[in-house]
Image (cartoon, rainbow, N blue to C red):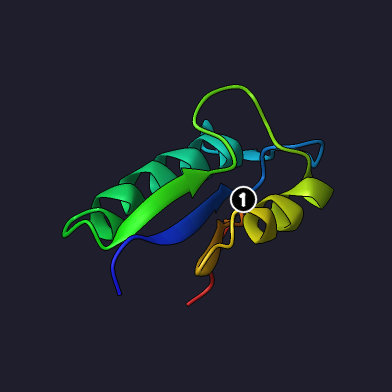
Amino acid sequence: MKNLRLFLDAGNRCKEPSNSSHYFFKKEITLKTTLKLDKYGTKDNDFKVVYTVKSGVVTELKDRPKKANFIDSYLFVSVHCKSILVLSINM
């Protein structure tokens, strides 16, 4: 199974709000995580990696699955995270 297309989507990038917690923004975390996944997919040249975003240009949310299907992706991975602010922890 060589040269399969891996479609990586850095979620939390489009018009949805980009909450922050402790000065970290979700869109920055998801982009960095998505770019790190590249090394696992291309390690043995098993996958050709395609991104929804690598810089500031963003593919609209509704167009992401269409793009993945158009290029006949083997796998679609969408990276998301949740930020919350914990004011106190009762143990």
Pinpoint residue 75: horizontal percent, then vertical percent: 51, 68
Q: How many marks?
A: 1
Quadrant assignment for the N terminus: bottom left
Residue in view at x 45 percent, y 59 percent? 6
Residue at 52% of width from left, 31% of height from top?
23
Along the line of sight, the residue nearer the viewer: 41 or 31: 41
Residue 73 appears left or right of 38: right
**In the displayed image of the protein, which residue is found farthest to the top?**
56
Percent x, y for residue 71? 59, 54
User: Looking at the image, which residue is at 83% across and 50% down?
Assistant: 62
In the rendered image of this protein, does residue 58 appear above or below residue 2?
A: above
Q: Residues within 10 Å of mark 1 (few under 14, many from 20)?
A: few
| Residue 18 horizontal/vertical position (percent) | 70, 37
Q: Residue at x 63, y 56 (%)?
A: 68
Q: Quadrant of residue 4?
A: bottom left
Determine whether the residue tagged by mark 1 lies in a helix, strand or loop.
loop
Name the residue carrying label 1. Answer: 85
Q: Is residue 61 above or below residue 80?
A: above
Q: Which quadrant of the view contains residue 2?
A: bottom left
Q: Residue 25, percent across and down? A: 57, 35
Dot 1 amino acid type: Leu
**Figure check: 25 above or below 61:** above
